Amino acid sequence: MSGSGPAPRYDAPVAALPALLLGAGLLLAGALTGAAAVVVTGHDWGLPLVVAATVAALVAVPTRRGTVVPFVLGWVAPVLLALRTRPEGDYLVAGDVRGYALLAVTFLVALVGVVVLATGGAVRRTPPADARGTHPDG
């Protein structure tokens, strides 16, 4: 029985598959949201819609590195790509109040990703005060 140790386990990659699929889906969702943000920011109704959709998505995504960070990377990438000059010499994001507001929102979204990375995804959400056993006094 020389060299016969425990058999190698191959179920670890299979167990990681749902997390990888979730991360890929959130990366795609972030990219679509960021690209839509670039497109609709030029309209009067665009920026409020961008902010509402982004906040709703960030609140809905569980606060973990593997979920928030892919969404944030996907969201920020199209905006940064849109900041490059086009062959015509102009920009896809206008240099007006709406364009700078989009940049501010992009900065805040990136900041959320940095905070989640810095805290290890351990951002605490305050439980409701009436939940049993969650209040420090009872």
Image (cartoon, rainbow, N blue to C red):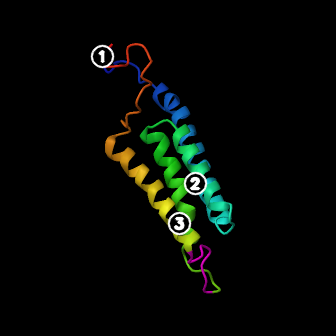
Residue 114 in the figure: left or right of residue 18: left
* Circle number at residue 51: 2
**Camera-nearest residue between 24 and 10:** 24
Looking at marks 3 and 2 on the same chain, the residue that comes earlier in the sequence is marked by 2
The residue positioned 34% from the left and 40% from the top of the image is 120
Q: Amino acid at mark 3?
A: Ala
Instruction: Name the mark nearer the viewer: 2 or 1.
Output: 1
The residue that label 1 is drawn on is: 137
Whole-percent x, y for residue 71 in the image: 53, 48
- Describe the element under mark 2 as helix, strand or loop: helix
Within 10 Å of disc 1 (Cα), the crowding (few <14, some 14-19, many 20+) is few
**Camera-nearest residue between 90 and 105:** 105
Residue 82 in magenta stretch = no
Within 10 Å of disc 3 (Cα), the crowding (few <14, some 14-19, many 20+) is some
The residue that label 3 is drawn on is: 101
Q: CA distance from mark 3 to mark 2?
A: 10 Å
Q: CA distance from mark 2 to mark 1?
A: 37 Å
Give residue 138's quadrant in the image: top left
Residue 125 in the figure: left or right of residue 80: left
Placement of 29 over or under 88, stated as above or below = above
Question: Does the magenta stretch mainly form a helix, a strand or a loop?
Answer: loop
